[in-house]
Image (tube, rainbow, N blue to C red):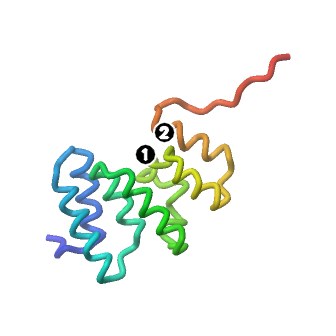
Amino acid sequence: MSGGHPYALVSVAGAFGRWGRQEAAAILRELSERAQRTCLPWAQLINIADAAGRRNLAVSYSERAWSEREPLFILFARHAPECHAIRAEARFQAILHEMGAPIEDRRRAGSVVTGRAFTAPRRRA
């Protein structure tokens, strides 16, 4: 149906990952191999790796995307819902810091994973 188009496969892999299906890992392998031969944004692989349960690999792809200043990654790293789960990772936090993300954004990013909203401590009067 998609003809193997990377963007279509990213969407399919994300859905498979959320459903806990092993096909997400197969799509990750396929696109990782393609990335070695053709131009494929690392930002696309981040979401697939995370969907396939490979969080460490997702963060590694994030580091590579940031080191290459990949526009798609820069656009989505701070706010895209697909990146919420990995924003609490220390290495991803380091990328956000290097990007100049406000500290409040970095704190709030971690709350997405824990399910707790970030609130600043109240000062006693």
Q: Residues within 10 Å of mark 2 (few under 14, many from 20)?
A: some
The numbered mark, 2 or 1, whose residue comes first in the sequence reads 1
Question: Which residue is the site of mark 1?
Answer: 85
Image position of 64 with respect to 118: above or below: below
Is 55 positioned to the left or the right of 2 in the image? right
Cα separation between marks 2 and 1 = 7 Å
Image position of 42 with respect to 87: above or below: below
Q: Amino acid at mark 2?
A: Val
Q: Amino acid at mark 1?
A: Ala
| Residue 61 at x, y percent in the picture | 42, 64
Residue sitting at the far top: 125
| Residue 15 at x, y percent in the picture | 25, 52
Location of the N terminus by quadrant is: bottom left
Which secondary structure, mark 2? helix
Is 91 positioned to the left or the right of 81 in the image? right
Marks 2/1 in contact by CB < 8 Å: the verdict is yes
In which quadrant of the rendered view does residue 30 lie? bottom left
Which secondary structure, mark 1? helix
Question: Which residue is drawn at the image coordinates 57% and 50% (left, top)?
Answer: 93
Is 63 positioned to the left or the right of 21 in the image? right
Question: Which residue is the site of mark 2?
Answer: 112
In which quadrant of the rendered view does residue 35 lie? bottom left
Toward the viewer: 106 or 29?
29
Question: Which residue is drawn at the image coordinates 67% and 58% (left, top)?
Answer: 100
Question: Which residue is drawn at the image coordinates 54% and 44% (left, top)?
Answer: 109
Image position of 97 with respect to 37: above or below: above
